[in-house]
Image: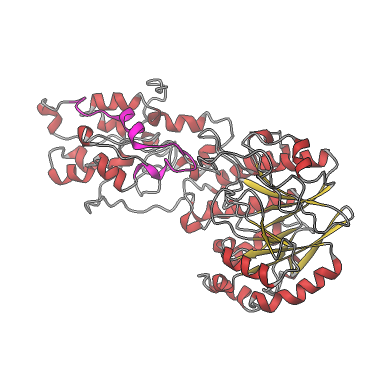
Amino acid sequence: MRRIDFRPWAGLVLSMAVLGYVGCTSNSSSRPEPGAPAAGKPAGTAGSSATADTSGPSDSKLLANLGNASAVLVVSGEMNGYLEPCGCTEGQVGGLIRRYDFFERLHRQGVKTAQIDLGSLTKDPAAARGGFEQAKIKFDHAIKALKLLDYNAIALSPEDMKVGVSEALGLFLNSLGEKARIVVANVDAPAGFEPMFAKSVIASVGPVKVGVTAVVDPAVIEALNDPDKNLLTAGLKRPNDAIPAVLNDLESKSDYQVLMVQGPPAMARSLAGAYPGFDIVVARSEYDDVLKQEAELLNEGKTQLIQVGRKGKFLGVFGLHPGDAKRLPYVAVNLGTRYDGPGTPMKQLIQDDYRTALRETQVVENIPRRAYISASGTTGATFVGAENCKKCHRETYKKWLSTPHAHAYESLVKDRKPGVIFDAECVTCHTTGFEYETGWVSEKKTPYLMGNQCENCHGPASKHVADPDNREFRAALNLTPEKAEKNRVCLGCHDLDNSPHFEMVSYYPKIAHKGLDDYQDPKLHKGITPKLAGSRARDAAPAAK
């Protein structure tokens, strides 16, 4: 990111972004988007790959790159709670609705599919914007989505267990169909959950049989901070103690053998080298995007190791050919706008049912809130809203009102997707003081905090409003551009998902307003008692284009 000399604008207010995410995944890399087989690898040969650009390849080209296979294995994983792109910036890719459309396209052409997932369906609640309750609801709907897509196997992921081991197992038990299984070779099925656990599964895809197993890094399971982790550790083994017997069984019953590894990529490579009987090894991804446009060939080309990226952007697809177990053409599919089909059942699940659950659970209203402590250590101030700032900073207020930040909440209300105002991951960047004790709660209780206002960057202003000339209170609100950049204030919302092209040098001048007000009137130095009733008129001024 380029740096800018902020001295001419020192002391200006810095508004945060108006963006949140339900599953915002943007193709923010500057790398070219390949749309053809990788150089030096003809389509349809072992190890070949063709990654779709954002619009996606034609269906016929996709199948040609898969060797015109009539059966395919689709690999996904590490969705990390990104159920769909939120649409708050151009170029976002991924999402379960597009994944549904991808499968529908294959099935309409008579292509049979088996589908497996590496796990990590949700995000660690401790790091999730929406908090524990929303992470759990996301996890539940992600499981239901894989059931709707008729998945054959889901690897056990320690990340998913962070919603609570018993909670996660219960959600799996309630939502998995009879066909889908949690597959893990080195963990024994916990008591009471035996029907949904398997050491391996055989997926029949037309005349082809695909044998699938998975292992999990024991150290990560042991490190779970959960009193119920004994449900998993009681029968926990080293991968090397579990794989040989399972692989031997799969080789006798299936045409292709697949290993999913929930552990560091180095572990996946080590296990692939130790057990060359596997045709495919699925490793955890080192980056969000698929950087390698072809499978990594191991064991003299016998084994293909793949990473399918994170956040649900990509699918890994193998062409399966009866009687030719060595021929495994591979395509990494970027779920771009080409796959914006109706996806009606998945759309119902991910947009309507999911957000109905958020509304009924009152995730936004019940988000855990904390006290606000300023950078200078000042405490006790409360959020009062921009209407109270306007009384002394009238011209500054007008400047803010002309920007999209002032209309952030309206953008949620008018969003084409239903119910986003009930989504904490969106609301956090579209309101003021969210997650703080006196910040945004709801349109009914805190209407004066709609939109992305002054206090999101400067902090709660009640003390300053009551005593404007108090140096301590003014210092607590002081935020220079240098401080904002150093403390990554803007990047709380202007992140790579939601604002991939954000640069202070180009964004900051749009909100600059130094010197718009003077404070010569003695009345401006007397202080006021903040009025919190009512709300700023939504249509007080048009948003800047």
150 relative to 371 in the view: left or right:
right
Q: Quadrant of residue 269?
A: bottom right
Q: Position of residue 403 (x, y in %)?
A: 37, 26
Comparing 374 with 44, the one in front is: 44
Of helix, strand and loop, which mostly describes the magenta segment? loop
Magenta highlight on residue 269? no
Quarter that holds the C terminus: top left
401 relative to 154 in the view: left or right:
left
Comparing 119 with 319, the one in front is: 319
* Residues in magenta, as a range: 489-517
Q: Is residue 156 at least partly visible in the picture?
A: no
Magenta highlight on residue 512? yes
491 relative to 223 in the view: left or right:
left
Q: Is residue 457 at least partly visible in the picture?
A: yes
Name the residue located 69 percent from the left edge and 68 percent from the top edge.
Answer: 184
140 relative to 493 in the view: left or right:
right
Name the residue located 74 percent from the left edge and 70 percent from the top edge.
Answer: 199
Q: Position of residue 335 (x, y in %)?
A: 65, 41
Name the residue located 46 percent from the left edge and 46 percent from the top edge.
Answer: 365
Q: Quadrant of residue 325?
A: bottom right
Above-or-below relation of 467 to 284: above
